Amino acid sequence: MTAVVLALVWLMGIAAVRLMMPAPLRWSLQNAIILSAGAGLGIGIASSLYFVVLALAGPNLVALASVEGAVLVVLVAAGLIVKPRLDPLDFASGPATPGYLTVLFAAAAVIAVIAAIGAYSLKPHGEWDAWSIWNLRARFLFRAGEFWKDAFSSQIAWSHPDYPLLVPAIVAMCWTLAGAETTVAPGIVAFIFTFAAAGTLIATVGILRGKMQSYLAGILLLGSTSFIVIGADQYADVPLSFFILGSLAVLCLEDRNPGDLRLSMLAGLIAGLAAWTKNEGLLFVAALVVARLVALFFYADRSAMGRRVGGIVAGLISPLAVVAFFKLRFAPPNDLLSGPGKQVMAHLFDFGRWVTVIEGFLIALLRVGGFLIPIVLLLALYWYLLRFKVEPGLRVSVATVGFALALMLAGDFSVYVLFPNDVAWQVNTSVERILLQVWPAALLAFFLAVNVPQLVGETQVVHKGKAKERVKRQK
Amino acid sequence: MLRAAPVQTGGSHYFVKLNCLARHRFAVIALAVIALGSAVWQLLDLLGALNRGTDFGVPAFESRFDQFRPTIKPHAVYGYFSDNPPNDPSSLSEYYLTQYTLVPAIIKPDTNEDLVVMNFHSERPDQAAIRAANLMPVQTFGHGVLLCRHPNR
């Protein structure tokens, strides 16, 4: 039953994304994006609805089923009625993709799926944060009946009751509609976010840079062992990484068709759901809007800047309204940000904190993805061998993704320096996951910017003289 | 001179020299091999852990509270007491696990509540420890789990 509920949630998301970027009902990369992004967006919409219904009508199964069902029917009807574009987005043209790369890509996908299932089987309740924060909250929402607000009690402040509710709410919604509490629900939700992120990355890079780049991006993300395992461990960092990637990916697609405000709104909607996933999502929303303004100011037609950013803001409204409703009405103050201003100033001028945080970020950078060797060094070598060549049509996209991620990391860095009392503990326990939140989007930026490799060549030897003759003949 | 096949990128054609071809192949294969190697390594680790199995973890801890859980009522608040040494790293995690297990009750990490959940690691609870905490057993649920209350309240 849980699987049926989540399938309907997925259908809701597919319909919502299709409404914003309609494509004919046949295989295309555009439909791959609709399927991937729709999986996460559906969870975000259903989770928001669950919380609003719970807050307004209490734990009422009929009200919940009616609202979720009505939204599903309306979205599916609208998604079917909307007129698709005639030329759906597909792989960009590029050099031939060798067969072995296709095999390696398929192998990476199969291994990632097996690893995710294996990691879930090992820890069906997830890792520490999963059961002590996200699933704990889901249990309160599901088990406590009319006392569901106990989930935000200050008596369990250690469980961070101010954290947003996307993950706990979708899990509690599945349990409520399925009528049973199982570890399958959080397990499937985690699986969906992990592979929806991979699908979104692969399809977006495929549309913008071609099949070979998309396969390489996919191999790298699916081979990121820490991304797969932390996803299966039911941490909210992977869902957050999905929303960060998804909003940036949709903006990159919007850059191909700058007049299409629906894509700006979709990007805003997905970014807003990042704020409904984790507090860092609020930071991302601010970073995204500023980054988009800067990128459009420097690399695009400035006359359309207001309209395009306005589209993002319009998309942000509904998810941010849900976040504001939760934060203002139910959530206690955040433990990190509730320290006195004097203490924050003292932290700012504490040289040791800066060293601790810089050291933590550098070590995490070398470990990002959980590869056998530091992947950033390998990517640096890859860049040296292939070089960056940002095509003119992709400059706004690369600038948007680059600025957004840089601002996001700068914000995270500032939070570490200024707020926690035990900065070493905070860095040690979370900085690797902070980098993982931006990892899929960083891969998007990298593979948009780096040259497409040339792997298939002619085998005949051409002597210099003959080559000159050939050039003359061609002239 | 060796030449590679013509490449079409963004509508323009160009030739890539063989040294470029080799560089590109090396870069791509290195990236793919490291990614796949890491994934396989991780998979072997996971499969090994699955084969070994584990007696400890959330399900095992939860099963100790199987008889206690049905008695829990929403909005109830319990204290918590354990025979773990205070500085034992597992002390905090077991308290968190107890809260996770006993939702929708709220479990506070002290013995100031009227009712206190006792989490012992032997079938025979340490009576001296219970008396020292000024508590009185109310009900035993097996696996070292029992409910106590303050005698004067």
Image (spheres, coloured by chain):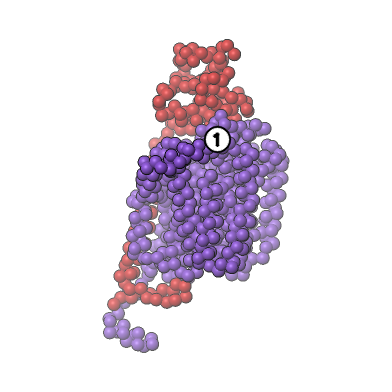
Question: How far across and how far down the image is residue A63, in percent?
Answer: 71, 42
| Chain painted red | B
Total marks shown come to 1
The quarter holding residue A212 reads bottom left
> Residue at the spot x=70%, y=46% of the render?
A67
The 10 Å Cα crowd at callout 1, few under 14, some 14 to 19, many 20 or more, is: many
Can you identify the residue that label 1 sits on? A136
Q: Chain of mark 1?
A: A
Quarter of the picture holding the N terminus of chain A? top right
Question: How far across and how far down the image is residue A155, in percent?
Answer: 56, 29
The quarter holding residue A21 reads bottom right
Question: How far across and how far down the image is residue A326, in percent?
Answer: 62, 41
Is residue A200 found left or right of A179 in the rendered image? left
> Residue at the spot x=72%, y=41% of the render?
A62
> Residue at the spot x=29%, y=77% of the render?
B1
Say if residue A331 shows up in the picture.
yes
The quarter holding residue A426 reads top left
In the image, residue B136 sits, relative to residue A146, either above or below, namely above
Quarter of the picture holding the C terminus of chain A? bottom left
Is residue A7 found left or right of A406 in the rendered image? right
Q: Nearer the viewer, residue B60 or A386?
A: A386
Per the rendering, the colour in which chain A appears is purple
Q: Amino acid at mark 1?
A: Leu
In the image, residue A144 sits, relative to residue B23, either above or below, namely above
Secondary element at image label 1: helix
> Residue at the spot x=58%, y=44% of the render?
A166
Q: Nearer the viewer, residue A347 or A72?
A: A347
Question: How far across and how far down the image is residue A302, in percent?
Answer: 56, 67
Q: Nearer the viewer, residue B147 or B85?
A: B85
Say if residue A115 shows up in the picture.
no
